[in-house]
Image (cartoon, grey):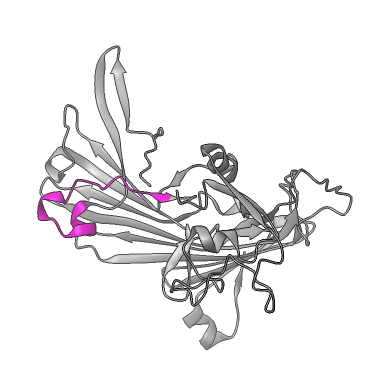
Amino acid sequence: MKTEATGFRIREIVNYTAEGVRSDSKHYCYGKTEYEENGWEIGRYYHTGAGEPTLDPTIQTYMNYQSTDLPMSVLNMVLEHDPNGQYRSFKSNPFMSYSPSGGYPVYTWEWECTFSAFNFQRLLNGRPAVVYPEVTVYYLKDGATQFSPENCNGKTVYQYDIYEAMQNDTAFFEKPQYYGNVLWYEGEKYRYNLLKEQTDYMSNGREYKLKRRESLIWRYGGSSVIDWEYSNSYGTPSFVPATAVLGNFYTSTCQMLGHSLLYERKVTTYDESETGITDTEHYTYLSGNRMRWKERNAGGLHRETNWGISGYRANWYNPGYCSQNGGKTHI
């Protein structure tokens, strides 16, 4: 089955100093470069434009089915699997039910499949059709149209946290499952648009030089809720307010209600020789997603900041000094 899809995404943002007078522009490219993806030397600054579909366009995502007294799964039949869900030949006809003594069918059965783009739209359920694990922004000089270093002042590469490790591979974090005969995705809205890494480069006219890298680690969690429509932005220990009323729709479906919190932020700045100095912060939180504690390590110094009910306290100290003198410097 061949499918085509279209959509909108930002291509270019242009700045003007006066009416009709361009100063510079930012050009957005999606996916890895052809050089990174396929090893093509000519494609160092040409991007694939590929993203990750939140919903794979397969026969299952376009199909609904129902059956009566069928001796085999309709889904297995459509996918050309045997009754055990394996892709192998049948030892006997799985769609016939015979009486051992009479040799004739003991009951009748029927099934029906419908294929429609509306089912695909139902599964999307307002989610973006494609998300991008990597986006590159080139800062073009006035009048430039190419993305090579001589045509740009620099570039920024953004990488997003959209994958989960599987047994032998990685996969998009929202995964489908069947509820009876109905395929559905458990939505995890709180895991969208989480920046994993931002890398800034400056151009010297010949090559891109690394200037700054920011790495973020997120911790997220949620609870599976049936027929949930209300979003609680403040968060509760169980993710669901005690007074919530959950109503049933035509088909009971599940989605995840939760939140994502920043656990670690690491920023490394680089000099002209690309030697880096790293500043690291860690965070913990109180209930309701309120900041409780922040630890910062920068340039050999260590700082801890604690937020209480009535205020906060900050401590700076040098780990080497403290190990010799047994104390902290309080501010």
Which residue occupies the foreground of this view, 51 or 329? Answer: 51
Residue 280 in picture, x, y percent from top left: 47, 66
List the single residue furthest toward the top. 19
Residue in the picture at 50% in, 49% down = 193
Q: Which residues are magenta?
A: 34-52
For residue 283, what is the image quadrant?
A: bottom right
List the single residue furthest toward the right. 243
Magenta-colored stretch includes residue 29 = no
Magenta-colored stretch includes residue 42 = yes
Up-down relation of residue 279 to residue 111 (above or below):
below
Q: Is residue 21 visible?
A: yes
Residue in the picture at 53% in, 86% down = 323
Residue 103 in picture, x, y percent from top left: 64, 73
Which residue occupies the foreground of this view, 233 or 176? Answer: 176
Residue 220 in picture, x, y percent from top left: 61, 62
Residue in the picture at 50% in, 42% down = 128
Q: Is residue 290 visible?
A: no
List the single residue furthest toward the front. 102
Residue in the picture at 53% in, 39% down = 116
Which residue occupies the foreground of this view, 330 or 83? Answer: 83
For residue 148, what is the image quadrant?
A: top left
